[in-house]
Amino acid sequence: MRGDGMVEQRVERRLTAIFAGDVAGYSRLMGADEEGTLSRLNAHRREFLEPKIADHRGRIVKRTGDGILIEFASAVDAARCAVEIQDGMIERNVRVPQDNRIELRIGIHVGDIIIEEGDIYGDGVNIAARLEGIAQPGGICISDDAYRQVRGKLDASFEDGGEQELKNIARPVRVYWLRSKEKSAIAPTTLALPIKPSIAVLAFQNMSGDPEQEYFADGIAEDVITALSRLRWLFVVARNSSFTYKGKSVDVRHVGRELGVRYVLEGSVRKTGNRVRISAQLIDASDGHHVWVDRYDRALEDIFAVQDEMTSQITSAIAPGIVAAEVLRAQAKDAGELSTWERLMQAHWHIQRFTPEDFREAIRLLDDLLRNDPNNATALSDLAFALHFSGSFAWADDPAAAFARSGEVARRAVASDDKDAAAHAMAAMDELFSGRHGDAIRRLRRAIELDPNSSFAHGVLSAAYAFGGEADLAIQQAQTALRLSPRDFLNVIWHITDAWAHLSAGRLEEAAECARRAIDWNPAFADAHGILAAASAHLGRMADAGASLDAFVRLVPGSLADQLAARPFRRPADRERYLAGLQKAGLSGK
């Protein structure tokens, strides 16, 4: 009894095995045939599911539409019941069309629960529900706590799914995928999606009827796998697994489930005479949606050169395509639902918008992410990028401090992952803007060795050459960056480095044209207007020069002198040519 005379109620708790299940794609099934779906589901419950649960001494706690929550005194009973249910559902679905099948997803966890009026609550229940949510149709996902209770006690196989971040669960949970050995030949593989984006590259189909083109088609797919494997943020399935589908007609959604990947790349090769047509498509395996599709027609004068070019073209298109899809996926979720990768993609969305407000929000999101994951090289690289341009455009309250912190964060990114090309490119950016042109160029060459298809590394190398006075090399690298990622939001910068290079070489018409391209891409970048003003003034086009100078001054916050001094020209003559052009355009009167 409490001191106030009231009787204190004790909370009833116990350790139990929690089984959570639901119907995969229930909304789609109901939308297609509401009455038929409900009739089939009720028949499964009455004839099979409820008797099977009773056989294994399970207590149905509640049903929620297509879902069910069950309590078992034993984890072994829960797992045996789950395996027999999934095996039985395979047999019950044999004669049912694929689109009409009722397939279950099951999650099992062992944990402490609270019992109140027959219902159960607590973190253990939440974890079981989240495990069910990441199970594939026809699959069983169990926690490591449940696995320790059942291993060696079932005639079943286990696949280690690694640590998974579960919605609203504070810590990652190690999971295992469970299926019976007896049914393993027909039961669906239930591999979890990795925490980071994942892709399988299928063997390209030879449409030529020419056996010799088989090697060419395989070679492109193999080279794409090798190139994608250099991307540290991307999980790439090995060739030995993805090529097992060669020569088969497959549903990419099935491939995604079997290989545990979000994206599938498939392609074809068709040779006619001395020309070859290569088609490729990147597909979201969760719903069959095409993320990216392209077609390439080439002359086959040098088959190896064509293979190299196609590998580069396809690979450089895939990475931004996946990032764009992942950004949209993250934007569609509430903040509480986001995994570490999705929080990173949310920050990336703000960076792509390239406004002072968005950069401030990106920095806040990345700082928050790094408090929990301080060695995330991708997050560190993105933070260094946001800080650098906040300083470069004087968007930060203290631009010098933003520059300094950008360099420190970039060095942390390299220390976290010395093989990350983006981390090296950001560290090189700091070296460049610190006046260490040679160090920056050496580091960027290293970044390109790590990832030859990194448009970012090629673009920053273009800037290093442009500010170093090596115009032709700068133009070459800018064009490579633009070719590797033709739809990239960063292309405005590579057009600007192209313009800087032409200006340093005294090629004023070309400098003005490149500056106009940059403005067409994104008119918010002050440097493009500044270069156009200087080049136009040197060419005697004073009306154009004055209008461009007005736009330049309008976009430059704070001290114009500080903004001009921040550009890392190695040769004094290049800075003087730029300033002289701005003065001719009327800078002294601004």
Image (cartoon, helix red, strand yellow):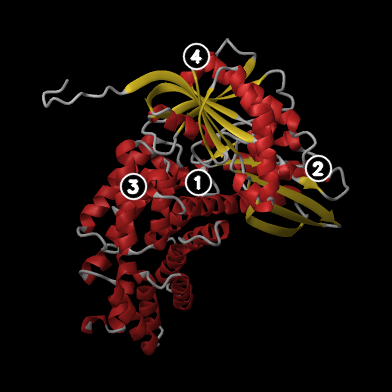
* Along the viewing direction, whichever of 238 and 135 lies nearer the viewer: 135
Please name the residue shown 32% across and 37% down the image.
372
Q: Which residue is mark 1?
A: 448
The amino acid pointed to by label 2 is Glu
- Residue 169: name its quadrant: top left
Q: Which residue is mark 4?
A: 149
Q: Residues within 10 Å of mark 3 (few under 14, many from 20)?
A: many
Nearest to N terminus: mark 1 or mark 4: 4
Specify the quadrant that holds the N terminus. Answer: top left
- Residue 92: name its quadrant: top right
Q: CA distance from mark 3 to mark 4?
A: 39 Å
> Picture coordinates of residue 81 (x, y %)?
60, 21
> Picture coordinates of residue 114 (x, y %)?
37, 25
Q: Which residue is mark 3?
A: 366
> Picture coordinates of residue 446 (x, y %)?
46, 43
The amino acid pointed to by label 3 is Leu
Q: CA distance from mark 4 to mark 2?
A: 49 Å
Q: CA distance from mark 1 to mark 3?
A: 25 Å
Q: Residues within 10 Å of mark 2 (few under 14, many from 20)?
A: some
Please name the residue shown 76% across and 50% down the image.
268
Q: CA distance from mark 1 to mark 4?
A: 49 Å
Q: Secondary structure at mark 2?
A: helix
- Asked if marks 2 and 3 touch (Cβ < 8 Å), the reply is no
Residue 515, relative to residue 274: is it above or below? below
> Does residue 428 appear anywhere in the picture?
no
Q: How many marks?
A: 4
Please name the residue shown 62% across and 17% down the image.
55
Please name the residue shown 36% across and 78% down the image.
534
Q: Secondary structure at mark 1?
A: helix
